[in-house]
Image: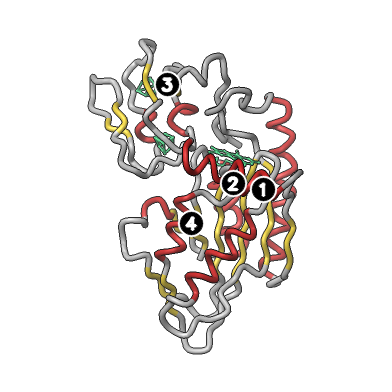
C-alpha cells in the first residue's frame, strides 16, 4: 500500500512507478483526509509514504494524514514500512519529522501493528516547483531534464531495495539541515502556507484547468466564469494551479512576476 501526495506530478510519477514495480496499491491521500483513514493490510503487505518535501519537512497534509491513520493487519503482521520523497535539492530533517509522526501515531493504531517506523527512507531530486518567494523560481529546462533522467534511473533501484525490504536512510539533507527545517521550515508553516495571495489576471480564458489541477479541490470553477479560490483550509501552496494554467494567468501576489512554469510530463 502506497500513500502518496503530489502537487505538480513529480511525486505521483515516482509513486506510480514504485507501485507498478513493487506490486503495491496506490492511495492519493488528498482524497482521503475527510474519510476515516482506516486501512486493512493484507498478509505481508508493506506500507509506503511518498510525498514532496515542503520547506525541508513533509507537507502538512501528509503529517495530518499520518496523525489520522489507522492500519489494521492480520495478527502478528508487522509491516515493512518505507518512504520515498521528491524534492528540488535538499530535505533537511524531513526524515526525523516523518519518523516522529509515525512513532506518535503508532500508539493509537488498532490491531496488532507495532514497531511502525520507516525502515528505508530515500530522496529523489526532481525539478523544483516552488515559486512563492522572491528569488525562488523553477529550474532551467536543462537542469529539470537532467534531474528527471537521473530520477528515471534511481527509481527502479529504489523499487528493488523496497522489494528486498532493505533498511537505511539514503537522503540528501543539504547544508545546515537543523536551520532549514526548524527555523525556515517553522516560519514557512506559520506564515507562508496561504492561498489568499492567489489571483487571476485578465489573460484568463476560463478553461478551468487550474481547478482540475488542484489536488485538494480548493478552486471553484463554473463555465464562463473566472476561477475563485475557496480558501478551504487545505491549500498547501503546491502551485499546481499556477503551473497548469495555459495562459500563465495565475499570480501569487507580485511574487510570481516573470517566473516560469513547470508541470511534470515524461
Ligand atoms: C511549498 C513548497 C516547498 C518546497 N520546499 C522544498 C524544500 O524545502 N527543499 C527542496 O529541495 N524542494 C522543495 N520544494 C520542491 C518540491 O519538493 C519538488 O519540486 C517536488 O518534486 C514537487 O513534487 P510534486 O510535483 O509531487 O508536487 C518545495 C516545493 C513547494 C511547492
Ligand atoms: S489552490 Fe493551488 S496551490 Fe493551493 S493546493 Fe490547490 S493547486 Fe495547490
Ligand atoms: S487555468 Fe488559467 S486560463 Fe484556465 S481558468 Fe484557470 S486561470 Fe483561467
- Mark 4 or mark 2: whose residue is earlier in sequence: 2
Ligand 1 within 8 Å of disc 2? The answer is yes
Q: Which residue is mark 2?
A: 53
- Mark 1 or mark 4: whose residue is earlier in sequence: 4
- Residue 205 visible to the viewer: yes
Q: Secondary structure at mark 1?
A: loop
Which x, y percent locates residue 145? Answer: 70, 32
Can you say whether 239 is above or below 119 in the image? above
* Residue shown at 58% from the left, 44% from the top: 185
For the residues labelled 1 and 2, the Cα–Cα distance comes to 6 Å
For the residues labelled 3 and 1, the Cα–Cα distance comes to 28 Å
- For residue 63, the mark is 4
Q: Secondary structure at mark 3?
A: strand
* Residue shown at 31% from the left, 31% from the top: 229
- Which quadrant of the view contains residue 140? top right
Q: Which residue is mark 3?
A: 250
For the residues labelled 2 and 3, the Cα–Cα distance comes to 23 Å
For the residues labelled 1 and 4, the Cα–Cα distance comes to 15 Å
- For residue 91, the mark is 1
Amino acid at each position: 500500500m502506497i500513500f502518496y501526495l503530489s502537487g505538480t506530478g513529480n511525486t505521483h510519477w515516482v509513486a506510480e512507478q514504485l507501485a507498478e514495480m513493487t506490486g503495491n496499491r496506490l492511495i492519493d491521500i488528498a482524497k482521503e483526509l475527510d474519510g476515516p483513514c482506516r486501512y486493512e493490510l493484507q498478509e505481508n503487505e508493506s506500507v509506503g509514504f511518498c510525498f514532496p518535501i515542503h520547506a525541508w519537512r513533509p507537507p502538512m497534509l501528509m503529517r495530518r494524514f499520518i496523525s489520522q491513520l489507522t492500519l489494521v493487519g492480520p495478527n502478528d503482521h508487522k509491516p515493512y514500512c518505507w518512504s520515498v520523497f521528491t524534492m528540488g535539492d535538499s530535505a533537511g530533517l524531513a526524515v526525523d519529522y516523518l519518523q516522529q509522526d509515525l512513532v506518535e501515531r503508532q500508539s493509537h493504531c488498532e490491531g496488532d501493528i507495532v514497531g511502525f517506523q520507516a525502515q528505508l527512507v530515500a530522496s529523489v531530486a526532481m525539478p523544483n516547483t516552488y515559486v512563492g518567494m522572491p528569488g525562488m523560481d523553477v529550474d532551467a529546462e536543462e537542469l529539470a531534464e537532467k534531474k528527471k533522467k537521473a530520477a528515471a534511473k534511481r527509481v527502479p533501484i529504489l523499487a528493488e531495495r523496497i522489494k528486498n525490504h532493505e533498511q537505511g536512510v539514503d537522503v540528501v539533507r543539504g547544508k545546515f539541515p537543523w536551520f532549514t527545517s526548524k527555523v525556515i521550515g517553522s516560519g514557512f508553516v506559520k506564515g507562508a502556507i496561504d492561498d489568499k495571495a492567489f489571483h487571476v489576471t485578465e489573460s484568463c480564458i476560463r478553461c478551468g484547468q487550474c481547478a482540475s489541477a488542484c489536488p485538494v479541490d480548493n478552486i471553484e470553477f463554473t463555465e464562463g466564469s473566472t476561477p475563485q479560490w475557496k480558501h478551504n483550509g487545505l491549500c498547501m501552496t503546491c502551485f499546481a494551479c499556477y503551473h497548469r494554467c495555459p495562459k500563465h494567468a495565475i499570480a501569487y501576489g507580485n511574487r510570481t512576476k516573470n517566473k516560469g512554469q513547470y508541470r511534470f510530463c515524461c
